[in-house]
Amino acid sequence: MPLNRRLMKTKAVLFLLLMAGMLVSPTSSAQGRSAASPDSDFESFLLPEIRADHPAIANVDVLLDVGHGGIDSGTVYGDVLEKDINLAIAQKTYETLRKRGYCVLLNRSGDYALSSENLWLRSRSRHVKDLAQRSHLANEVKPKMLLSLHINSARRSGKRGPLIIHQKNEQSKQLAIALQTALNPLYGTTEEPVMMGKKYYILRHTKVPAVIVEMGFLTNAQDRAMLQKQDMQWSIAAKIADGVKQYMSQQQQQQ
């Protein structure tokens, strides 16, 4: 890849992180945000050897991919929008994981699409540019895992519960099992994780262990009520954190 194009891609990723204040380590300020660096410091991040020494870039445990945003509402049920619930639970998961000592990044902190940050992909499709930016961010930062948070929908209103979708590799499968096992009791379900199909762009193009966490069905009345309650959102966040802990423990034992 030409150097100029690679620098543009890297700059776009770091601009997204810095402007959103998401370069966070477990020892960050109480607000969980680091101030944007001066221009000289920002340019220094473009050097791989310097960027790799930055603790918030080199030692990321979890990258939370907040599904949809901006013009893309995701699943909609009446005036309930998936993108809003994804963000609410992602923020709670972010806080829960940080309190447990993990270094966490959140790739969307408000109601916007990531496609506008993609300055490097030549595509007319806003959707493809959005997904490409998400996977590119993961590939640049290289976290130990990527969790893509979403909410499901189905033609049958009776279908409910969490569903974890994983890549075609053992690490992703182990991560999916850990998360599914942690979440099932909260919903009273016995679902098993499933392997991705061709349509899951972010799983196909992300090089680190990644899963899609479908946190319930917006088309199911029970799940819908659960997903909108603050206390249940915190419970979901806690169960996701439990799954992360279980996966990290398994990986350490296997080393």
Image (spheres, rainbow, N blue to C red):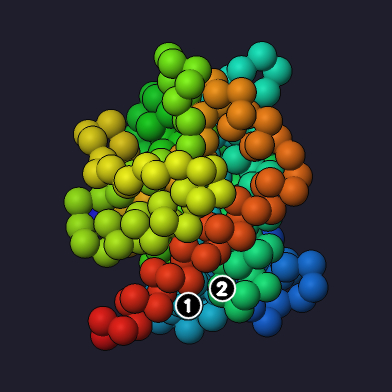
Quarter of the image for the N terminus: give it. bottom left
User: Which residue is found at the position 72% from the left and 68% from the top?
Assistant: 32
* Measured Cα–Cα span from mark 2 to mark 1: 7 Å
Q: Is residue 197 above or below residue 13?
A: above
How far across and how far down the image is residue 43, in percent? 55, 69
Q: Earlier in the sequence, mark 2 or mark 1?
A: 1
Q: Nearer the viewer, residue 158 or 56?
A: 158
How far across and how far down the image is residue 184, in percent? 47, 49
Find residue 176 and report its image quarter.
Answer: bottom left
Task: Give SS at disc 2.
Answer: loop
Q: Is residue 35 above or below residue 28?
A: above
Is residue 133 shown to the viewer in this render? Answer: no
Q: From the viewer's perspective, tell me whether residue 106 is left or right of residue 246.
A: right
Q: Is residue 197 above or below residue 18?
A: above
Q: Nearer the viewer, residue 176 or 46?
A: 176
Task: Give SS at disc 1.
Answer: loop
The amino acid sitting under disc 1 is: Asn
Disc 1: which residue: 59
Q: Nearer the viewer, residue 128 or 158?
A: 158
User: Which residue is found at the position 54% from the left and 21% from the top?
Assistant: 219
How far across and how far down the image is residue 238, in percent? 61, 60
Q: From the viewer's perspective, tell me whether residue 92 is left or right of residue 171.
A: right
Q: Nearer the viewer, residue 194 or 14?
A: 194
The amino acid sitting under disc 2 is: Cys
How far across and how far down the image is residue 194, in percent? 28, 43
Q: Are marks 2 and 1 in contact (CB under 8 Å)?
A: yes
Find residue 145 and report its image quarter.
Answer: bottom left
Disc 2: which residue: 103
Quarter of the image for the C terminus: give it. bottom left
